[in-house]
Amino acid sequence: MLPTYGRVLAAVCALATTATAVVPVEVKGRDFVNSETGDRFQVMGVDYQPGGTSGFSKSKDPLSDPKSCLRDAALMQRLGINTIRIYNLSPEADHDECASIFNAAGIYMILDVNSPLQGGSLDRTDPEGTYNAEYFEQVFGIVEAFKDFPNLLGFFAGNEVINEQSVKKVPAYIRAVQRDIKDYIKEQVDRNIPVGYSAADVRPILVDTVNYMMCEDKDEPSASSDFFGLNSYSWCGDANFKKAGYDVLTEDFSKSSIPVFFSEYGCNAVKPRKFSEVQAIYGDEMSQSFSGGLVYEYTQEDNEYGLVKIKDNGDATLLVDFDNLMEQYAKLDMKKVQTAKESQTGAKAPTCGEGLIKNGTFLSTFDLPKRPSKVQDMIDNGLKDAKTGKLVDVSSAPVEQTIFDHTGKEVKGVSLKALAEGETNAPGKHADGKADGKSDEKDEESAAGALSAPVWGLATGAALATLLL
């Protein structure tokens, strides 16, 4: 055993703070890439909306409770993911600590700009009436709240807004929202942040949807999607590449010019879920058309898609699906997953035109609605009185809540690991904790040291001085 001084020093070193754990991801052709190394970035994540819409309000959303965020980020590190998607966020909530916690954990965020509150989304039945300044206070408010976090991967301008009944009007409004967000970012943000759309797997309009969203129009250069998400649940139980229709999806997106990934996947018609589709999504046959995916969803809600069940007191149980997904991730060859190909990064977008649209019911013109004057003013001068988020220091720290495995045994030693600068979470890198109701001496010493420090804002020198008194 180390002497007292040595154990204290080791504990303090383990608690080093971070302000830049990850570097921004950017789009190059059909790939997401690390902006510094050029390595391909494959989305390997989960959809994260604890409590669903009922857990959301103007002052409360998934990134407003630091204690819950630390618990979930630590468990996600254990799972091996690198990305979360969040559907409903409030510009009025304080997100600094939570966004910084996920940054320290090496986990990126893809954020929907809409909310379920009145005026917070584009209504597919009335796009003209809801495309207004009130709506963009929500949209630009989310941009302001998260624009300065390096782990912000991108924004979704819409989720499943386009369907068979809305194909004649809504697509133009989605492109307009993308245009407006991208123009706001250009004027008000120090870096380029990708903007895209999340679509349902609806036939026969899916291919028309991606073609419409990704094509470039010289008259509206900001309107095209930077990436495209697909919500698909076709792989159920012991399906395979062809039975699930993944061969068709791979062909459908083989000529895309932007990154395409599953923004939702994980059919639960057969339980527990085995997630065997993970090997296909990140395998050779499919990974040239897809950039990974997000499992629906992290927390267990009434629809029973969860990986983790959260109790009223904040304690958490890791469900069988959690372990099954972690096992599938562990089988992946991460070096192959992260390799970028020149043929991918050099892909060019097609020019917008009627020839891209094959289904006669889908909108085939590319004229966009005129931007409201008040929205133009926001873009030119910034959103008035916006609450702009900022990165704060985050320390390695143990999870305060009690964690159980699916058999009911307590999992000891679960901690958030504040990663080194430039490091991203990945399968097997930070899977600590023991499901035997015991922890070894090393775990106990590490936890004891971590308990003496706050979750954020730790100054290592000050902590050392305090501990040595």
Image (cartoon, rainbow, N blue to C red):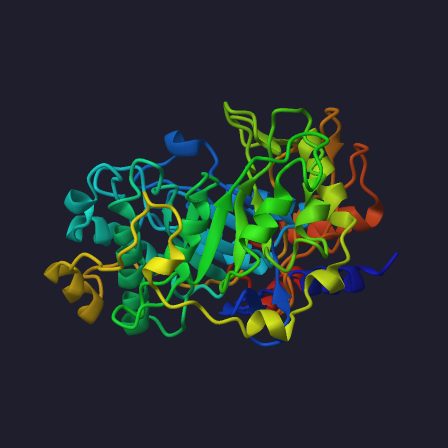
Q: Residue at x 34, y 71 (%)?
A: 189
* Residue 465 shows up from this direction: no
Quadrant for the C terminus in the image: bottom right
Residue 32: x and y, percent? 55, 65
User: Residue 46, position in %: x, y?
Assistant: 57, 44
Q: Using residue 25 as the reference point, say whether residue 438 is left or right of it.
A: right
| Residue 394 placement (x, y as % from top left) | 54, 59
Image height check: is 145 above or below 382?
A: above
**Horizontal placement of 106 versus 199: left or right?**
right
Towards the viewer: 276 or 321: 276
Locate residue 333: give its quadrant: bottom right
Q: Is residue 31 visible?
A: yes
In the image, 305 versus 171, the foreground residue is 171
Q: Is residue 53 above or below residue 133?
A: above
Query: Which residue is at a point 31% across and 43% down the rendered structure image?
Result: 167
Q: Is residue 375 left or right of residue 71?
A: left
The residue at the point 40 percent across, 71 percent down is: 192
